Image (cartoon, rainbow, N blue to C red):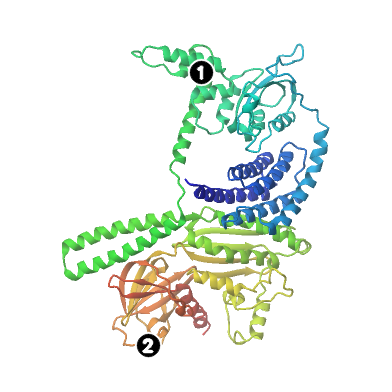
Amino acid sequence: MNLDEALQTFITESRELLEEMENALLNVDLAGDQSEAINAIFRAAHTIKGSAGLFSLDHIVAFTHVVESLLDGVRDGTVALNDEMIVLLLSCCDYLSELTDALAAGRLDADPDMAPQGEMLLAQLRRHMDGETAEGAGEAALVLPAEPGVERIDQEPGHSDYWHISLRFGREVLQNGMDPIAFLRYLTKLGRIVGIATVPDAMPPADDMDAEQCYLGFEIAFDSNADREAIAGVFEFVQDDAEIRIIPPHSKVSHYVDLIRALPEQGARLGEILVRCGSVTAQELAGALQQQSERSEAEAPQQLGSILVDGGNVPPVVVEAALAKQRQVSEQKAQESRSIRVDSDKLDRLIDLVGELIIAGARTSMVGQHLHNSELQECTSALSGLVEEVRDAALELRMVKIGATFNRFQRVVHDVARELGKDIGLIVDGEDTELDKTVVEKIGDPLLHLVRNAMDHGIEAAGQRLANGKPAKGMIKLNAFHESGSIVIQVSDDGGGLRKDRILAKAIERGLIDPERKLSDSEIYNLIFEAGFSTAEKITNLSGRGVGMDVVKRNIQALRGSVDISSEEGKGTTVTVRLPLTLAIIDGFLVQVGSSVFVIPLDMIEECIEYATEPGQDYCNLRGQVLPFVRLRELFRLGGAATRRESIVVLKLGNQRAGLVVDTLLGEFQTVIKPLSPLFSEVRCISGSTILGSGEVALILDVAALMQSVSGKGTAILAA
């Protein structure tokens, strides 16, 4: 990997770490173990700083060092984590994101235009650290021996039940931004250091010393009631850069077993695991290894665990636990080896090639049918099956979970709630639901607008909610699930709901509808998607509910999706967005009207029935229910006479049903979606095109738009 590739990896990983840091900050109050959440925040900042140091990104290192110092104070309890600090740390995440974006744009040095923002944040960080500095000054200093060499640890008489901690810091620990003395100071939060000796054995001659490298080791006698895991946790962030041995005052088998199971998941041999947990010493391990190597090659090799057990060095149950841990590590490594990073452009290229393969396969199949060659038809049939499997496998590669998109709204809800002075929470459900990455990328902005509008004009102020018998805290809920080959995303709020009378009055005032026309509740609610339509009494900088909703609907329709609203006054509103799982390749159903061929998404077809309706009627009786339909010949003004046996294709979208009257049913067809030219962007009821096996172009019907064109027919027929 060259430097540019490594830098791109750093940028990608930094963005992921900042996202994890932001989520941890937003959920720190909800975490069962708050210390673990704080450690996760610290770990993200430390990793970014260490990685930035590898690329000499000094401006990022300097900033994250101050953030890390503040978080270190939070970890050891000298600085309290409050709401003000969470907001500050979130601003630091934003600033680091901007630095990362600048890095991605090719600016490796600090941007002078961003310097004032960075200085302001650094000043606020240092202000919060003042309390830590003052408190830290009052602590007892750690006195290290003035004389070189290992000195005898000065233990108090009559006391031998101390923990013994042996530390050997790695050479790179200082370059990675770690201060060895800080770990010892943090250790005093768990107990009392009763003796300490510095081990400078690794110190080179003065001429060979590097001021940026660490040569220190320590032998420590430690008096504490903390458990082994808590003591090991002190050195969590340096465990990869140091050798750490923790020997307990009283060795109990249960303590060793628990420790082995709690070890970090790193590749370690059995002996290393036992030495790390203190079950055996390094000398005992060396003796067992020597005994193992001295056995005759003719004899069956004896397992290390058996040697240690036979020698009385360690109880059998501890060896069993270590072996179980070893298996767990191996399985974890095997799982990790099955995951790789792939550039999204390569996946897009693969999908394009699969699309061309499908078109070529359709052409081959048509040639086989035209030649009436049974052997060729058999081959093309087998080829079609394989192509379909390749298509499904390729599309699965681009499927991603929507949870990452949903989690971004935690920050949106946090910031907007503070801006509005409201107490609002976010509930996320269905985050494991998968859909095409291109859909995920493009649905973010419409969802953002829906969430902000729900918070601004959907959820009432705390006083009004209490007066209405509701909890003071309002809730936004994001939910996603699969339904009929599509993904459904719902944005719900428990606010005041939409007022039908005001919406209807506003629509009549603007001349959008006839005052005499009878509308269903759904039709009334969907009026807010008209351009500029709003009933908000006060328009804020977040926009009133309805302002910009026409843009939301247009963006969703551009994804071949649909949007619908349901609401109950005083209880809340739910916006339902339906989207296709992919924008690349779908299963389609071919129909023909005159000489024109159209494609209907197969997952939106419920059934096909024979046309048996009186001339002039635009509905039929489908098993006791009114089914409005539209004639494609009339809709697109196609010439030619209808065939003697027309058919009706029954479509279903959510709870809506409608029919399409067509001349001929041609059957299923793997459809590669090709975008239409911008020249046809205003054409209604058409969402794209595809290429048939004959090389001709067929148009893909927009089912959501077709449904809208007949949405009022069923109600009007029943009213008549």
Say above or below: 720 vs 690.
below
Where residue 610 sits: x, y (%)? 33, 77
Q: Is residue 683 above or below residue 147?
A: below
Q: Nearer the viewer, residue 560 or 468?
A: 560
Name which of mark 1 and mark 2 comes first in the sequence: 1
* Left or right, residue 652 beside residue 229: left
| Quadrant in which residue 302 is drawn | top left
Residue 284 image label: none
Mark 2 element type: loop
Give 587 or 615, whichever is nearer the viewer: 587
Given the image, on which type of amino acid does mark 1 rest? Pro
Residue shown at 67% from the left, 48% from the top: 25
In the figure, is residue 693 to the left or right of 503?
left
654 in relation to 250, above or below: below
Q: CA distance from mark 1 to mark 2?
A: 88 Å
The image shows residue 69 at horizontal and vertical percentages of 72, 41
The part of the image, by quadrant, that contains residue 518 is: bottom right
Q: Dot 2 corresponds to which residue? A: 615
Give the secondary structure at mark 1: helix
Q: Which residue is mark 1?
A: 316
Q: Is residue 403 left or right of residue 135?
A: left
Q: Is residue 375 visible?
A: yes
Query: What amino acid type is highlighted by mark number 2?
Result: Pro
